[in-house]
Amino acid sequence: MLKTAQDLIRRAGERLGLTPGDIEYLLKTEAEHEFEIELTDGKRFKAFRTQHNSVLGPYKGGIRFHPEVGAEEVRALATLMSIKTAAVGLPLGGGKGGVAVNPREISREELEELSRKYVAGLIEHIGPDKDIPAPDVNTDSRVIDWMVAEYEKLTGDKTKASFTGKSIENGGSLGREAATGHGGVIVLREVLEELGDSAQPITMAIQGFGNVGSYFGEIAEKDHPNWRLVAATDSSGGVYSPNGLDAKETDKFKRENGRLAEYKIAGARTITNDELINTEVDVLVLAALGDVITEHNMDTVRARYILELANGPISEKAYDYLIQKGIIIIPDVLANAGGVVVSYLEWLQNKAGEHWPEARITQELEQYLTAATRHIFKRAVQDKISPTEAAISIAIERILKVRDSRRQQR
Ligand code: GLU
């Protein structure tokens, strides 16, 4: 994933005529923190936080708890965060963190201790004006609340602006939990409109029916009755139903039973994740993990659009192949930016000591993502480049502009 992210930035930079020095500047990370967390029962885990670029503002980005977390992946994800915040016009930089752990294999007490020790290990490097972490894969408001409590204990800060994605009772924002999925719906709607494809009904398949994928499915179902969800999977597999799946019911089953492969409903059949990727649909929604479409399965894709709700779900080879086939990839840095947009709104509310109504959050989310989508897709058409390259180009121009104006002021 790191090579893919870096190569895409390098290519965009070369096309923009940047100097090798500027390209290097965009690729390098400003700081990388790696440490070991030891729990009182002796279990040890590797922990990471990478701070990629802070020219536009404090570092911002999630923390994931996943057995496959490693230095390279975190570096790739931090780089994507800098591009994401810049591409959608937020005054924030990019960072990412993680712990190499399977949270399902540890107890609630161990999870809390791990979350708190993660903060203690980074205390010098994070904070409301330095680096503001948030949830990511397998982390939620419960984990973030523990982290904020530890941050408060160690620093005395009472603003709650040190982390976003908190529970509502603890200074979180309305709409944050649903924000990434909600943002995906807004972006897809805008893309279909921008490309003159919004009048027809569309079919969709969602890979990764977790927090992001299920909110996407449910909000799409509510806001767009002519978008039909025909397939959904989680890591166990899932279901295909040509007549349509009810996203709310599917989510209910998933919450109560855990595994979508066991979901049995009339008119539907069980499918694997490979079959989901191979489903003939208008929009394939990738909401699971990174590198799920690679050279090994890229030729099985039969969708017209791919919405990247996960970070880095398509490898470089697959990206080139799919673009060449004319498939429209709606890039992660735009498609899943709803999460960080509402994180930014949460941070603003904490800083101002305010709590905004949900309608205001939705309105601001709409504004950011509509403007960003139009800007990116217009640029793609104008420069005859992919939306991914357009988003990266816009982002790196913004970063370099601010960096250069600062240099001149010195
Ligand atoms: N983890 C999310 C992302 O990858 C959200 C980051 C944030 O809210 O800071 O964009």
Image (cartoon, rainbow, N blue to C red):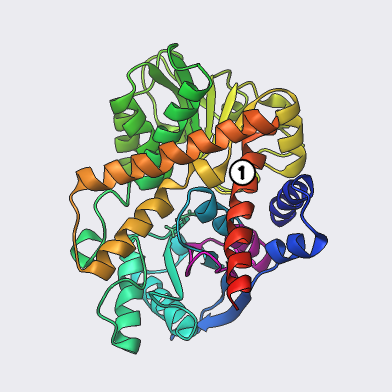
Q: Place residue 120 in its image quadrant.
A: bottom left
Is ligand 1 less than 8 Å from the beta carbon at label 1? Answer: no
Element at badge 1?
Answer: loop
Q: Taking 241 as reference, is 176 above or below it?
A: below
Q: Is residue 20 magenta?
A: no
Q: Place residue 359 in its image quadrant.
A: top left
Q: Taking 353 as reference, is 298 above or below it?
A: above
Left or right: 122 as drawn, with respect to 386: left
Q: How many marks?
A: 1
Q: Given the image, on which type of amino acid does mark 1 rest? A: Pro
Question: Does residue 391 appear in this view?
Answer: yes
Report x, y in % for residue 348: 30, 63
Q: Taking 199 as reference, is 357 above or below it?
A: below
Which of these two is toward me, 353 or 323? 353
Left or right: 183 as drawn, with respect to 402: left
- Name the residue at 63% across, 47% down: 392
Report x, y in % for residue 329: 61, 32
Residue behind mark 1: 313
Report x, y in % for residue 274: 62, 31
- Name the residue at 31% across, 45% down: 364
Residue extending furthest right? 20
Quadrant into which the C terminus falls: bottom right
Q: Which residues are magenta?
A: 51-79
Question: Does residue 259 appear in this view?
Answer: no
Report x, y in % for residue 257: 35, 41
Which of these two is toward me, 240 or 229? 229
